[in-house]
Image (tube, rainbow, N blue to C red):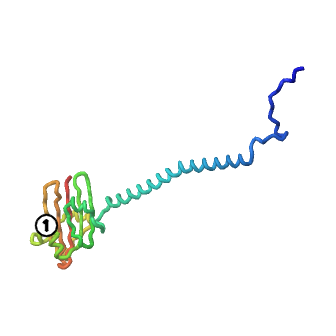
Amino acid sequence: MNPPPLLPRQAAAPDDGGAPASTVEDRRHVVRRRWITAIIILLLVGVPAGYLAISAHQSRQSGRDKAATVGAAKVRTAWPSAVQRSIYEVPIPMMASLVGYLETNNWHTSRLYTQFSLTPRELDTFLADIGTSKDKLTPGVSISERDAKVAGWSWSPKHTWYGITLDAKNPRPTRDVTVDLTKPGNPRVYVVSTAVP
């Protein structure tokens, strides 16, 4: 007699005591994997977005600062940069006080308006550095009304004004220099340097 054929073993039904489809440990693993995935996605999206937001803010702030500088309507209290002083040939002595400037630019001309106070000796040095001297100054204001209006300067008739215009061929700038000698011990200098590109 032949033995009965062997049938493949079937898995026991769940209610027969077989293993459940998932365990509590498996659920924890799934939850952890989902959290890690969410954190990775958040970092991949959030970090670049945050960087872009910070960059945009800094760019806007920088633009506002530049606009404030370019859009300035009058001379403001600050030192022009060394590059500006070199381009416009305005060698402000390092010991000068109450320094202010304004730079304007358009397609035809660029101007640097500067003002500062000096000692009499520093005034002599400044005038020598720009190629002139106190003896060559003439009574009156050498700066035009238009330039004075742009810079916010006014020339009181009660003050003692002396000036000179130093012409130069392009690309060197032409400089109008006016000095307030009302207080001889504390002269105040006003310069408009005009460069044509």
For this orientation, the residue located farthest to the top is: 1
- Judge by depth and name the residue closer to the eye, 96 or 146: 96
14 with respect to 74 (left or right): right
Whole-percent x and y of residue 55? 44, 54
- Judge by depth and name the residue closer to the eye, 148 or 3: 3
The N terminus sits in image quarter: top right
Q: Which residue is drawn at 30% across and 67% down?
A: 78
Whole-percent x and y of residue 30? 67, 46
Q: Is residue 2 above or below residue 126?
A: above
For this orientation, the residue located farthest to the left is: 135
Whole-percent x and y of residue 58? 42, 57
Are there few (<14), some (14-19), or many (20+) residues within 10 Å of tag 1?
Answer: many
Q: Residue at x 12, y 65 (%)?
A: 131
Q: What element carries label 1?
A: strand
Where on the picture, by quarter, is residue 96? bottom left
Where on the picture, by quarter, is residue 104? bottom left
Where on the picture, by quarter, is residue 71? bottom left
Total marks placed:
1
- Judge by depth and name the residue closer to the eye, 150 or 68: 68
Q: Residue at x 29, y 65 (%)?
A: 74
120 with respect to 40 (left or right): left
49 with respect to 107 (left or right): right
> Circle 1 sits on which residue?
164
Callout 1, which amino acid?
Ile
Whole-percent x and y of residue 194? 20, 59
Q: In this view, does 4 lie above or below 118?
A: above
